[in-house]
Amino acid sequence: MTALSYFCKMKLLDGKLSSQAVKDDLIVQVKELKQNGKRPPHLACILVGNNGASETYVASKVKNCAEVGFQSTLIRYNDEISEEELLIAINKLNNDEAVDGILVQLPLPKQISEQKVIESISPTKDVDGFHPINAGKLVQGFPTFIPATPYGMILMFEYFDIDTKGKNAVVIGRSNIVGRPMSVLLSGNYKYGNCTVTICHSHTKNLEEICSKADILVTAIGNPGMIKANMIKQGAVVIDVGITRVEDATALRGFRIKGDVDFDDVATKASALTPVPGGVGLMTIAGLLKNTMYAYLHKDQ
Ligand code: NAD
């Protein structure tokens, strides 16, 4: 807890605590599988090119798989790979009995259609939950893979026992990987759902006014520090999904990671707030690990 959050009596939604709880459960499950003579879940990650942020994300996914006892395979291609070659590689993984989950790190180089890649992954191994079949199931409330970031946020609500029932939730951002599925989950008839949801985007008028009525505000924009205290209802729960690299010559790597929320300002009004880094990013990995276990357990269905 930072000095400021202590002073403000604001609850820091620390992703280290909530993600470790998810990982501890998975470690127990993997131990049981091994005791019963079964192999652990296996995640295959495809990384195309040398994008710095993608390298970091994939390395973290591989490291976290090892931490919970999953097998993982990292398959790398240079950024000149053709779409056809990549689709063939995915098809091989689709047909590999020893692989439970397939993740293709986005973004991809221009010559490759991301949508074609998403649709080429078997819906039963789609641990990112981006395949239209799984997105459709999510909207209709059927069990399926939930995109890792929204899933991670729901797991965080569960860990910190955040009451969502009947609350006004505002989700800023309508992407297929964060904002839209999060709005679906929060509006669904689930323990950590049942909110009245407003979804905002780049064409929303009066963003400030809409946000200031939110009991729960989820922001997934990618504009560092844009969300200030004047946009927040007193006592709101604020979840910051934004991750932007901001140049900083004093930082070791020459940049810092910033969220959408002006943390110190919003901390004076929010009742609970996620830090960046150390919040939703860690829970996204937790969501991915849970999805990989789900793929393993449901592979014959
Ligand atoms: P995106 O670019 O697809 O979506 C951004 C959304 O913000 C769009 O829907 C757009 O309409 C909306 N937007 C832009 N300007 C706005 C404005 N002025 N007012 C209201 N809405 C506005 O991005 P994305 O993939 O959904 O990611 C959003 C952010 O979350 C990025 O910073 C990304 O890096 C981060 N992210 C973090 C995680 C994590 O694990 N923490 C995972 C995925 C994405």
Image (cartoon, helix red, strand yellow):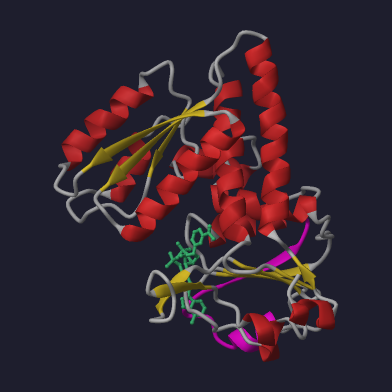
Horizontal and vertical percent for residue 75?
A: 31, 35
Q: Where's the N terminus, which quadrant?
A: bottom right
* Residue stretch in magenta: 192-211
Residue at the far top: name it.
37
Res. 192 in view: no
* Quarter of the view holding residue 132: top left
Residue 278: x %, y % from top left: 61, 62
Give the number of marks. Answer: 0
**Residue nearest the viewer, comparing 213 with 274:** 274
The answer to which quarter of the image holds residue 247 is bottom left
Q: Is 242 positioned to the left or the right of 278 in the image?
A: left
Q: Is residue 152 magenta?
A: no
Residue 209 magenta-highlighted: yes
Q: Position of residue 277 (x, y in %)?
A: 57, 66
User: Split into 4 quadrants, where in the image is the C terminus?
Assistant: top right
Q: Residue at x 80, y 60 (%)?
A: 164
Above or below residue 38? Residue 160 is below
Residue 158 appears at what percent x and percent y?
78, 50
Asked whether 157 or 71 is in front, the reply is: 71
Q: Is residue 72 left or right of residue 158?
A: left
Q: Is residue 62 above or below residue 199?
A: above
* Outermost residue toward the bottom in this view: 230
Residue at the image position 36 percent from the left and 52 percent from the top: 55
Q: Vertical placement of 39 versus 94: above or below?
A: above
Q: Quadrant of residue 99?
A: top left
Q: Is residue 113 among what the camera can see?
A: yes
Residue drawn at (35%, 25%) of the image? 93
